[in-house]
């Protein structure tokens, strides 16, 4: 039923519609919201060079601190958490390399953008004044901070968003709306890391300068995905047995104990592993793909395409 012109959308209605589209975990952040508390840490991180070659993370802090740069009519940010499959860590036998759990299914950017767009269009059929923008890790937005402020979880010392009872093995995505949401549940305290420092102490490359401060240049995920060109001998040694991404700072986190002890199902079938069982990639299979065409045929639609054949075989 169309509601025609409206200045606000009831929370319960949007939550029920989101559930229909398989979007089970969401939280709302009304706008305006003061982002100024994040300026100092963001600019210090940029100035320290911790972004490495990620030029998109070196853009002006003003872009990150005001979402209206992305969507001028902004009144509401709807944050979604979508779980991908997690499972117990397995030994890595000779001839195999590890792939981060998030990268075993279809590329989340495309999947989440399509799913959220369908959800927003269905809501737009009811609220004709609704205009929106769908975001999935693709624009300058402090999405983990936004999600924490909305009540979706808290930011851990490993810089990941953690939701108690769920952990951190989930994707984030947002929709930016020009309408307000009414009846938003009060966001409660989601917990903290307390005195735990497992992620800081067990990072295989000591990539954390301090709690909440990651030097991407030493992070295995950065080295295997973001860094272009050949790696130095030191960098290659730092990879250990990882070919794409790294899950160590999540694997050692107590909040992920349950999802690693017992396999956590993905919210969407799209995120089920596609031929790489237990996150272990056969190097013989990888090196048998001698051309980009063969590589594309094997890994089309998966996050591994971002590194490409050359990046995975460095």
Image (tube, rainbow, N blue to C red):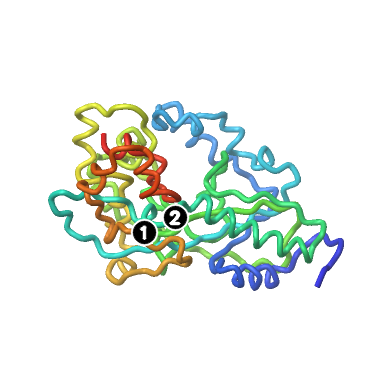
Residue that appears at 38% across and 46% down: 304
Numbered tag placed on residue 118 in the rendering: none
| Circle 1 Cα neighbour tier, 10 Å, few/some/many (<14 / 14–19 / ≥20) | some
Image quadrant in which you'd find residue 20: bottom right
Numbered disc total: 2
| Quadrant of the snapshot with the N terminus | bottom right
In the rendered view, tell whether residue 140 sits above or below residue 120: above
Badge 2 is on which residue?
106
| Quadrant in the picture for residue 68 | top right
* x then y, percent, for residue 221: 34, 42
- Residue in view at x 75 percent, y 52 percent: 131
Considering only vertical position in the picture, is 47 above or below 198?
above
Residue bearing the label numbered 1: 274
* Left or right, residue 77 beside residue 142: right
Mark 2 to mark 1 CA distance (whole Å) = 8 Å
Give the quarter of the figure containing the C terminus: top left
Asked if labels 1 and 2 touch by Cβ distance under 8 angstroms, the answer is yes
* Residue drawn at x 27%, y 29% as measured from the top left: 231
Q: Residue at x 33, y 52 (%)?
A: 100
Q: Position of residue 168 (x, y in %)?
A: 40, 59
Above or below, 26 against 31 in this view is below
Crowd tier of the residue under label 2, counting other residues whose Cα lies within 10 Å: few below 14, some 14–19, many 20 or above: many
Q: Name the side, left or right, on which 179 lies relative to 110.
A: right
Residue 209 visible in this rendered orientation of the protein: no
User: Which mark sits nearer the N-terminus, 2 or 1?
Assistant: 2
């Amino acid at each position: 039923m169309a509601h025609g012109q409206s200045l606000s959308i009831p929370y319960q209605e949007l939550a029920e519609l989101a559930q229909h589209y398989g979007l089970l975990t969401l939280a709302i952040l009304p706008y305006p919201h003061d982002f100024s508390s994040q300026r100092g840490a963001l600019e210090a991180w940029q100035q320290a060079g911790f972004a490495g070659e990620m030029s998109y993370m070196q853009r002006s802090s003003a872009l990150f601190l005001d979402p209206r740069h992305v969507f001028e009519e902004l009144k509401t940010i709807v944050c979604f958490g979508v779980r991908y499959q997690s499972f117990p860590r397995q030994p890595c036998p000779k001839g195999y390399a590890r792939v981060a759990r998030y990268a075993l299914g279809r590329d989340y950017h495309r999947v989440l953008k399509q799913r959220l767009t369908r959800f927003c269009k269905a809501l737009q059929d009811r609220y004709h004044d609704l205009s929106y923008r769908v975001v999935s890790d693709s624009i300058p937005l402090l999405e983990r901070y936004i999600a924490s402020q909305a009540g979706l979880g808290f930011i851990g010392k490993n810089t990941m968003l953690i939701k108690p009872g769920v952990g951190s093995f989930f994707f984030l995505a947002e929709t930016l709306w020009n309408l307000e949401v009414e009846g938003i549940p009060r966001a409660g305290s989601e917990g903290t890391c307390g005195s735990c420092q497992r992620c800081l102490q067990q990072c295989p490359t000591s990539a954390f300068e301090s709690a909440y401060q990651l030097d991407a240049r030493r992070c295995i995920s950065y080295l295997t995905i973001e860094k272009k060109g050949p790696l130095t001998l030191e960098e290659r040694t730092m990879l250990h047995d990882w070919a794409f991404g790294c899950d160590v700072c999540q694997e050692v986190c107590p909040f992920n104990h349950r999802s690693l002890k017992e396999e956590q199902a993905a919210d969407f079938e799209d995120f089920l592993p596609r031929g790489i069982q237990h996150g272990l990639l056969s190097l013989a299979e990888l090196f048998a793909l001698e051309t980009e065409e063969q590589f594309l045929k094997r890994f089309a639609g998966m996050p591994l395409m971002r590194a490409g054949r050359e990046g995975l075989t460095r």
